[in-house]
Amino acid sequence: LRRLRESSARAAELSCAGEDAGPLCRASMAGGVKEVFDIDEASWNMLSEAPYAQVLWIVVTFTPWCESCKSVVAEAASLASAGRQLQVAALNCYTSASLCDGFGFLGHPLVGVRYAGDDAGLRDAVAQWVAGRDGAAQRLPTNWTFGGDFGGLWRGLAEASGRISG
C-alpha cells in the first residue's frame, strides 16, 4: 500500500490547498480514522491494478465545503476500522473535477464500490447490489449510490457475501 499511501498524501495536499479548504480537506481526518485514502485521477486508476484490485474499495465523493460528506466518510471508515475486509477512499471532486465530471456526478456525497479482484463471490455481491438499486440511484453511474443510501449498500453487500461481514 506504500505507493497508494504516497499518492494519497499528494491528493490530500492538493485537497487542502487554497484559501478555504473546508472541514473535509483531508478525508483521512474524518472521525480521526487513518484508514481513508485520499485519491485523485492518478490513484483512481491504481485501484484496478495489483495488488489493490484484490481489495473491495468503498469510495466516497466529497467537496471540501460539504458537511454531510464528512459523516458518510466517517461511517465508511468505521467499517474499515472494524476489521472488515475493505478499504475506504475519498475522492475530492473539487480538486479532481475532471474525473468526477467524467462520471457525471451532480452532487455529493456519493458512495461507490470498486472491485476488480478474483473473488467470484465478492464480484457477485457487487453485481447483486447494483441490480438491486432502486429509484434515483439507477440514474447514477454503475456501482454508485447516494451517500444517504450507504447503509443499504453495506447491508446488501454483507448479505450477499460472507467475505466482508466482519
Image (cartoon, grey):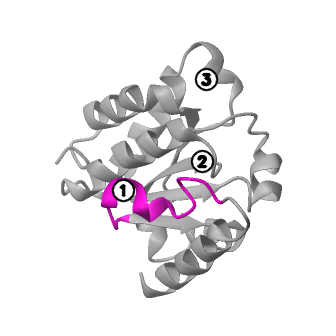
**Mark 3 to mark 1: distance in Å?**
25 Å
Residue in front for this viewpoint, 49 or 70 = 70
Residue at 61% x, 23% y is: 137
Residue at 61% x, 48% y is: 62
- Element at badge 2? strand
Q: Disc 3 designates what residue?
A: 137
The answer to which image quadrant residue 35 occupies is bottom left
Q: Disc 1 designates what residue?
A: 119
Magenta-tinted stretch: 21-35
Q: Quadrant of the N terminus?
A: bottom left
In the image, is residue 85 above or below residue 1? above
Prevailing secondary structure of the magenta residues: loop
Q: Residue furthest front?
A: 19
- Which of the two discs, 1 and 2, sits closer to the camera? 2
User: Residue 153 placed where, x, y %?
Assistant: 41, 32
Q: Residue furthest top?
A: 135
- Which of the two discs, 3 and 2, sits closer to the camera? 2
